[in-house]
Amino acid sequence: MWKRPILAVLIVSILSPAIAANQGQSQGRGGASSAGKQKEKEKEKEKGGTESRPHENAIFNKADHDTFRDYFRTHRITADALPPGIAKNLARGKELPPGIAKKALPNDLVAKLGSRAQPGVTYNIVGDRVVALRAGIVIDVMEGLFK
């Protein structure tokens, strides 16, 4: 008669730590834990995703900002702002979508970069920014030129 209660207590005492350890790790909706977010970031780094830093190979400097702004004002080159989502992706260094309008930077303006104009890098006006691209990936961005 007393064997059943003891057996029940024994089973509960064995299973309760395992149940408690799995608390909060459901697969339903809700925010990911910080450990889960860290794993996602590590996967993105391995893929070369959002954690990449577009300005590691900076081409533009502060003097270029003034030079380019003056050139655009003198030659009356204007631009429209980018949609917010595309602007965020551009800031993260992601590839530009294929339908985005790009204008090539004038050759005389690229020449003002001097030795910093690297082979294999293209320079475009994308929306209201000047962008340096290598193999379609953003490596440097200059903003605030058309204000």
Image: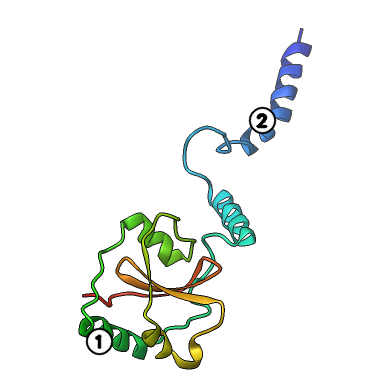
Q: Relative to the observer, which residue lies in front, 33 or 11?
A: 33
Q: Residue at x 29, y 69 (%)?
A: 128
User: Does label 2 or label 1 sit earlier along the sequence?
Assistant: 2
The circle on residue 132 is: none
Q: How is the image coloured?
A: rainbow
- As helix, strand or loop, the secondary structure at mark 1 comes to helix
Kind of residue at disc 1:
Asp
Left or right of 49? Residue 30 is left
Q: Is the residue 37 above or below the residue 139 in the image?
A: above
Q: Secondary structure at mark 2?
A: helix
Q: Is residue 35 above or below residue 131?
A: above
Q: Residue at x 64, y 38 (%)?
A: 21
Name the amino acid type tagged 2: Ser
The reply, left or right, for residue 70 in relation to residue 56 is left
Looking at the rendered structure, which numbered label has been put on residue 70? 1
Residue at image mark 2: 16
